[in-house]
Amino acid sequence: MYRAAVIGDRDSIYGFSALGLDVNIVEHGEDARPIFKKLSTGEYAIIFITEYLAEELSEEIEKLSESPTPAVIPIPGVTGNTGCGIKAVKASVEKAVGSDIIFND
């Protein structure tokens, strides 16, 4: 059975443990890199990651984009939305449809 995990700073992700997700508290991209690598090769189907860390690990996340699992979902942190999540949705829509049908700017 697949599991779900979350990676980010303590204040942004601590509540996810109440939902049954495996919580991995890190503050910097370099600390998150080995944890992300371990989670992405294990039994995890979904990895939520704060947008700040997702930007720092963009190369690793890009490598997983062709694989069905795990799905890597950027989430805003307590410091606010960086726009990384919206960019990921836009790129996925453009890849699936062939053009930008949502944001159309």
Image: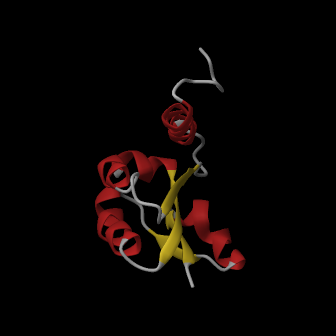
User: Hey, which residue is sitting farthest bottom in the picture?
Assistant: 1
Q: Is residue 84 above or below residue 22?
A: above
The answer to which of 71 and 11 lies nearer the viewer is 71
User: Hey, which residue is sitting farthest right in the picture?
Assistant: 18
Left/right of residue 68 with respect to residue 20 in the rendered view: left
Residue 9: x, y in percent?
Answer: 50, 62
Residue depicted at 57% across the width and 85% down the height:
1
Number of numbered markers: 0
Q: Is residue 95 above or below residue 19?
A: above
- Identify the image's colour scheme: rainbow, by chain, secondary structure or one colour: secondary structure
Quarter occupied by the C terminus: top right
Residue 87: x, y in percent?
Answer: 51, 35
Left/right of residue 64 with respect to residue 94 in the rendered view: left
Residue depicted at 68% across the width and 70% down the height:
15
Name the quadrant containing residue 2.
bottom right
Residue depicted at 57% across the width and 46% down the height:
79
Q: Is residue 32 above or below residue 50?
A: below
Residue depicted at 29% across the width and 70% down the height:
34
Residue 97: x, y in percent?
Answer: 56, 32
User: Hey, which residue is sitting farthest front in the picture?
Assistant: 97
